[in-house]
Each structure stands twice: as structure tokens, then as C-alpha cells.
Image (cartoon, grey):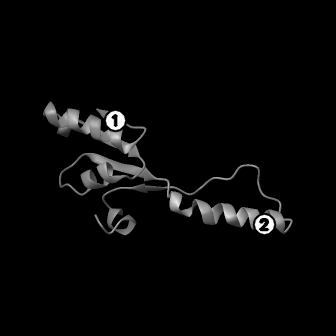
Amino acid sequence: ILFGCVNDQAGQGFWSAAETSGRTKDVLVVSQGADDPALANLKKPANNWLGSTAYLPEHYGDYILKMIVGLKNGVKIPQMNYMKTQFIDKSNIAAYNPKY
């Protein structure tokens, strides 16, 4: 059973339902946000929470300012611009957030 969740809080709800029903070995959880529910579950041993996408909003300001400066200096900015995201899983959680 695969749960793809819109955010980590929804993922926690699905995970809690799996725990309550004794089905944690039958589910896989993937979520978005890289918030505390996902990070805490990723640190638990033998847990089937696969990971969460981090959107890194702390970088938005620098990203937008570079575009603004570019526009001011006559640089043609692509119509579509996308922020980099990072999938956080058991292999990279410590590098993403040393608290975990």
C-alpha cells in the first residue's frame, strides 16, 4: 500500500492509521514538506516512510533577488523559473537537518 501525501501532516495521519491497524509493514509513505512528522519518522529504525520533498523556502529570497538584479541589468529572464527541491530520505536526513 503506497501513500503519496500532499504534506507531512497527512502522511502522519496515514502512518498512524497503519500503526493502529498493525499494517506498517504493508505500507510505504512519501510526502511533501520535509517537516517534523516526516523527519521524525525517517529517523525511526525499520520504518517504511520513504521520504519527503523539501522545498527549501529559506532560499526563495536569494533566488528572486538574483532575478531582480538580472532584470535591472538587462538580462533576459526565462519565462518559467523553478526552485530546486530535494528529496529527503534516510540516506541524507542528517545533512539536511542535523537535529535529526
List x then y, in percent, for residue 80. Answer: 71, 49
**How many numbered marks, from 0 up?**
2
For mark 1, does the 10 Å Cα neighbourhood hold few (<14), some (14 to 19), or many (20 or more) residues?
some
List x then y, in percent, for residue 92. Answer: 36, 63
Image quarter of residue 68: bottom right
Quadrant of the frame with the C terminus:
bottom left
Question: Which one is closest to the eye, mark 2 or mark 1?
Answer: 2
Amino acid found under the numbered disc labelled 1? Phe
* 73 relative to 95 in the view: left or right: right
- Residue at the far right in the pictured view: 74
List x then y, in percent, for residue 44. Answer: 20, 54
Cα distance in 3D space between marks 2 and 1: 41 Å
Q: Are marks 2 and 1 in contact (CB under 8 Å)?
A: no
Q: Secondary structure at mark 1?
A: strand
Q: Residue at x 73, y 62 (%)?
A: 67
Q: Residue at x 19, y 38 (%)?
A: 24
Q: Which residue is mark 2?
A: 70
- 83 relative to 28, above or below: below
- 80 relative to 67, above or below: above
> Which of the pair 59/53 is nearer the observer?
59
- Which circle's residue, 2 or 1, is located before the other in the chain? 1
Q: Which residue is mark 1?
A: 3
Image quarter of residue 42: bottom left
> Which of the pair 45/11 is nearer the observer?
11
> Which of the pair 24/15 is nearer the observer?
15
* 16 relative to 57 in the view: left or right: left
Q: Secondary structure at mark 2?
A: helix
* 72 relative to 48 in the view: left or right: right
Quadrant of the frame with the N terminus:
top left
